[in-house]
Image (cartoon, rainbow, N blue to C red):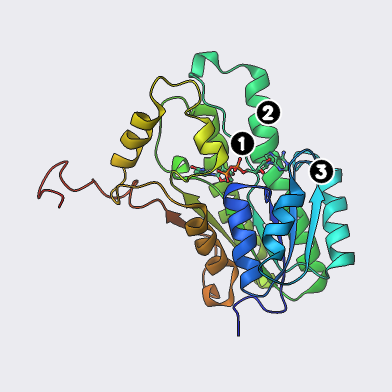
Amino acid sequence: MPEMTNRVALVTGAASGIGLATAVALAREGAAVALLSRPDDDLTTAQQRVQAHGGRVLAIGADVGDSAAVRAAFDRVESELGPIDAVHNNAGISIVAPLTETTDELLDTLVRTNLAGSFYVLREAARGMQARRRGGAIVNTASELALIGQAGYVAYTATKGAILAMTRSAAAELASWGIRVNAVCPGTTKTPMFLAEFDGVADPEAELADNAASVAMRRIAEPAEIGEAVVFLLSHRASYITGTHLIADGGRTTCVPAGSIGVSAH
Ligand code: NAD
């Protein structure tokens, strides 16, 4: 039987990239899936892509940085698809700027979306799961940049490090309710967000190649590869895993690429 049969899942940031890939994988595994993304995102196309893999799919435009909108979205999913027992808390943005050029406005935007937004979704997921007393699973999207530093990402990494801290405390608090909370730490992944970071650089192809060369596996991830890691953490196959993070980064944060030192790459 598919892994997520009879489960109702909600994915935030589901209009593109990693969220859309997770939603597709969840639908393929038999879940009914709610797609939540910004109101101006192309949710119609996303819904069609997920629906092609079967099951019921509901699309809702909402800003995760608006707690009332998040609550209303959860209520709507519960009334139209049923009780939510799997959540991929994934919506996020990246802003690349030197520390001294990161304005209060940029910081507020990042914190509102990545940190407050993730908190609101986590809180709403916990409320519903606690009320029904049937357990559940939540995966928060952090980043490899919650684990290593990178120039230009001081504010972004602050929000992603906070997501890991939040994941551990929520897991501690919710374990007795049978609710598991974990995080995924994607490495560089071919999504609109990542590719947009190369806008304006002189030679995007060369920059992308440099980026791939810093990964032990020498390539950038496909969104589906991150989606599979998320579905694993949401599934019953991860039944004894909580309060931790799964790094899906091709070895970037843990391995020196072969050839840098030691034996050569082949
Ligand atoms: P993406 O831009 O393709 O997808 C993000 C989605 O979230 C978009 O559909 C966007 O409209 C939506 N979104 C943004 N702000 C929102 C808001 N306030 N409310 C609702 N929806 C909102 O980017 P992605 O690369 O798939 O990013 C998904 C997550 O993965 C993010 O949290 C990001 O920080 C994280 N991440 C990405 C990479 C990467 O290399 N792509 C690496 C590590 C972590």
Mark 1 is surrounded, within 10 Å at the Cα level, by few (under 14), some (14 to 19) or many (20 or more) other residues, namely some
Q: How far is mark 3 from mark 2, CA to CA?
A: 15 Å
Count of picture labels: 3
Q: Is mark 1 within 8 Å of ligand 1?
A: yes
When the figure is inspected, residue 169 is found, relative to residue 201, above or below; the finding is below
Q: Earlier in the sequence, mark 2 or mark 1?
A: 1
What residue lies at 47% left-to-right and 52% top-to-bottom?
A: 222
Disc 2 secondary structure class: helix
Residue position for label 2: 109
Residue tagged 1: 93
Q: Tell me if I can see residue 254 in this picture.
A: yes
Q: Earlier in the sequence, mark 3 or mark 2?
A: 3
| In-image side of 181 versus 38 (left or right) | left
CA neighbours of label 2 inside 10 A, class few (<14), some (14 to 19), many (20+): some
Ligand 1 is found in which quarter of the picture?
top right
Residue 153, position as x, y percentages in the image: 48, 29
Q: Which residue is mark 3?
A: 67
In this view, the residue in front, 251 or 59, is: 59
Badge 3 amino acid: Ser
Question: Residue 189 at what x, y percent from top left?
Answer: 47, 46
Q: CA distance from mark 2 to mark 1?
A: 9 Å
Q: Nearer the viewer, residue 52 or 4?
A: 52
Say which amino acid is labelled 2.
Answer: Thr
249 lies left or right of 179: left
* Nearer-the-camera pick, 129 or 194: 194
Residue drawn 47% across the image and 28% down it: 198
Q: Amino acid at mark 1?
A: Ile
Disc 2, disc 1: CB below 8 Å?
yes
Q: Is residue 10 left or right of residue 212?
A: right
Q: Nearer the N terminus, badge 1 or badge 3?
A: 3
